[in-house]
């Protein structure tokens, strides 16, 4: 059974930091680009960051650029999202995802991701 499991969410004060992890099992995603998305209450799911197979190419939403950093360790089947300088507007459920198609290109489109985790809550207090 293919699983993506997020962890590391929690409650943090504005200006604080968190590190989210996404651990995969059931198959390897070392040949799939992966990404992070988030969904705030009452809002649509938005792209946050994406990373290529090797980790050499990354992409970020403008709202998190310079504050969040995505990385992956294929040997550990794990992807990370480092959240720094957090703001109350970063409060959301964060989801990790793996693209359906094997390949190198990152994507901001959630329809290109076939595998999703259950999400982890990040709450930033002001």
Image (spheres, rainbow, N blue to C red):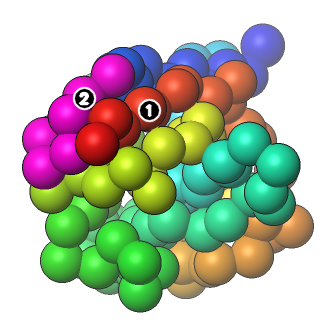
Left or right, residue 64 beside residue 15: right
Which residue is rendered at x = 35% and y = 38% of the image?
124
Quadrant position of residue 101: bottom right
Q: Are marks 2 and 1 in contact (CB under 8 Å)?
A: yes
Instruction: Give left or right: position of 92 versus 124.
Output: right
Q: Taking 90 as reference, is 115 above or below it?
A: above
- x, y (%) of residue 13? 20, 34
The residue wearing badge 2 is 12
Residue 31 visible in the shown view: no
Q: In the image, residue 33 lies at what x, y percent?
A: 53, 64
Query: Within the magenta stretch, is there residue 13?
Result: yes
Report how far apart the C-alphas of labels 2 and 1 lie in the structure: 8 Å
Above or below, 20 against 126 in this view is above
For mark 2, does the 10 Å Cα neighbourhood hold few (<14), some (14 to 19), or many (20 or more) residues?
A: some
Q: Name the residue under label 1.
A: 122
Label 1: how many residues lie within 10 Å, few (<14), some (14-19) or many (20+)?
Answer: many
Give percent across and percent down for residue 112: 80, 68
Q: Is mark 2 on a helix, strand or loop?
A: strand
Residue lying at the far top of the rendered structure: 1
Identify the residue shown where x is 43% and y is 32%. 123
Q: Is residue 112 visible in this depiction of the protein?
A: yes
Residue at the image position 30 percent from the left and 55 percent from the top: 87
Q: Quick one: label 2 or label 1, which is nearer the N terminus?
A: 2
Query: Residues in magenta?
Result: 11-16
The answer to whether residue 59 is magenta is: no
């Amino acid at each position: 059974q293919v699983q993506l499991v997020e962890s590391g969410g929690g409650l943090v004060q504005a200006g604080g930091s968190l590190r989210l992890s996404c651990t995969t099992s059931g198959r390897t995603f070392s040949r799939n680009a992966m990404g992070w998305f988030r969904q705030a209450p009452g809002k649509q799911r938005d792209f946050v960051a994406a990373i290529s197979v090797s980790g050499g190419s990354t992409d970020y939403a403008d709202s998190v650029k310079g504050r969040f950093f995505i990385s992956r360790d294929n040997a550990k089947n794990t992807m990370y999202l480092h959240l720094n300088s957090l703001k109350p507007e970063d409060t959301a459920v964060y989801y990790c995802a793996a693209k359906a198609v094997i390949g190198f290109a990152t994507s901001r489109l959630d329809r290109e991701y076939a595998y999703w985790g259950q999400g982890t809550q990040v709450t930033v207090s002001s």
